[in-house]
Image (cartoon, grey):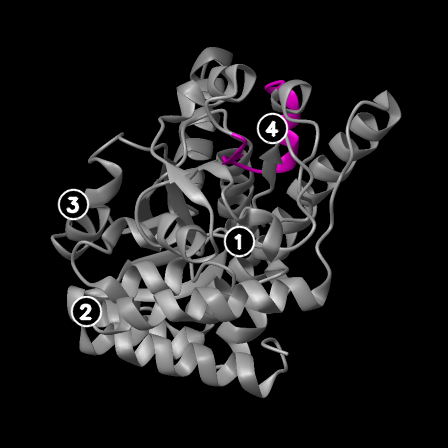
Amino acid sequence: MFKPLSKMVGLAISTLVLCSASQAADYNFKFQSSDPAGNPNFELQQAWTKALAEKTKGKVSVELMPVGSVVEHKETQDAISGGILDGHITDTSYFSGKDAAFGLIANPVGAWSSPQQMFDFMAKGGGNALMNELINPYGLQFIGATTPGLEALVSKLPLDKVEDLKGLKLRAPEGLVQNVFAAAGAAPVNLPGSEVFTSLDKGVIDAADYTVFSTNQAQGMHDVAPHPVYPGFHSMPLVEVSMNKQKWDALPEEIKTAFSDSVAEFAQTQVAALAAKDEEAVKTAKAGGKITIHDWSPEERAKFRVIAMGQWEKVAEKSPNAKKVYDQLTTYLKANGLLN
């Protein structure tokens, strides 16, 4: 006896649901980002999760949540080791309160003139292994590094060399960035980001370490500070992709490889996408004819690095791990002619 059509349709739908369930991911993870939803970085990170799923033919599913979804941005490391989260995509410097080494490897101010220089250090200079030495004791496994790229400086005054920093009233965050600029002769000022535009406009400060060129342009910074330094030479954060070490260790080798390869590909995609955004903003700014962009020479960048090294040394004294980062970083920079 034939079943009524409605029952046959219902049976077909049930079968599809069961088939879909059987094809669900073998490995499901919850990661938290240090970026908010809607941020260009977060959108690129979401694209990474999709690429990873495709690379593993659906075996791996990463649910990526924006900053603060489960814990605060400085708490993700503890949340991962405690099993509350499985992983994170975050600026490593957020954990420098636990060990100064995190701050030094995350943003050795003045070290890099391009994202690729940092990627080369991580891949060929021992940076990847060093990161695992730092985070394995906290129950995390480092998968790979990315970065939004070099931050630009906004300035009311022409800045073409280290000497031009002398006496410059510069907004810079506390810590290593501020210390390096002070050592270079600038007069750093503590200001929240919300006050940068007004302070530049009123002459409270001459320049500011704020963010990347495209964001500076979009927020009108160049209207009051028409001498940006681009590409930047000072600040470029290392953003780590890491996960719970026990869960990592339990993964098959092909899944680990997919994770590592997809993160490396994501890093290049992120850098290219954000660089394109900066380049478009630079083109628009130049077409307006109201700003002068200053690009420091390799020689001046190297001078700034040497000054920065003096501050790295002080950070290196704060912990054995920080000393290890300092030694490996400076050895690599010297061997590759980046201090010449």
Q: Amino acid at mark 1?
A: His
Tell whether 306 sits left or right of 140.
Answer: right
Can residue 2 be seen from the camera position used here?
A: no
The residue beneath circle 2 is 318
Please give the label number shown on residue 84: 3
Q: Amino acid at mark 3?
A: Ile
Mark 2 in CB contact with mark 3 (< 8 angstroms): no
Please give the label number shown on residue 216: 4
Q: State which region is magenta.
A: 206-220
Residue at left offset 66%, top offset 63%: 300
Location of the N terminus (image quadrant): top left
Q: Secondary structure at mark 1?
A: loop
Mark 2 in CB contact with mark 4 (< 8 angstroms): no
Q: Secondary structure at mark 4?
A: helix
Residue 104, position in %: x, y?
35, 64
Residue 217, position in %: x, y?
66, 25
Locate residue 35: give its quadrant.
top left
Name the N-terminal-most of marks 2 and 4. Answer: 4
Locate residue 180: give its quadrant.
bottom left
Name the N-terminal-most of marks 3 and 4. Answer: 3
Q: Secondary structure at mark 2?
A: loop
Is residue 153 depicted above or below 249 in this figure?
above
Number of residues whose C-alpha sits closer than 10 Å to that of mark 2, classed few (under 14), some (14–19) or many (20 or more) = few
**Mark 4 or 1: the one toward you:** 1
Q: CA distance from mark 2 to mark 3?
A: 30 Å
Q: Amino acid at mark 4?
A: Asn
Q: CA distance from mark 2 to mark 4?
A: 34 Å
Residue at left offset 28%, top offset 48%: 94
The residue beneath circle 1 is 234
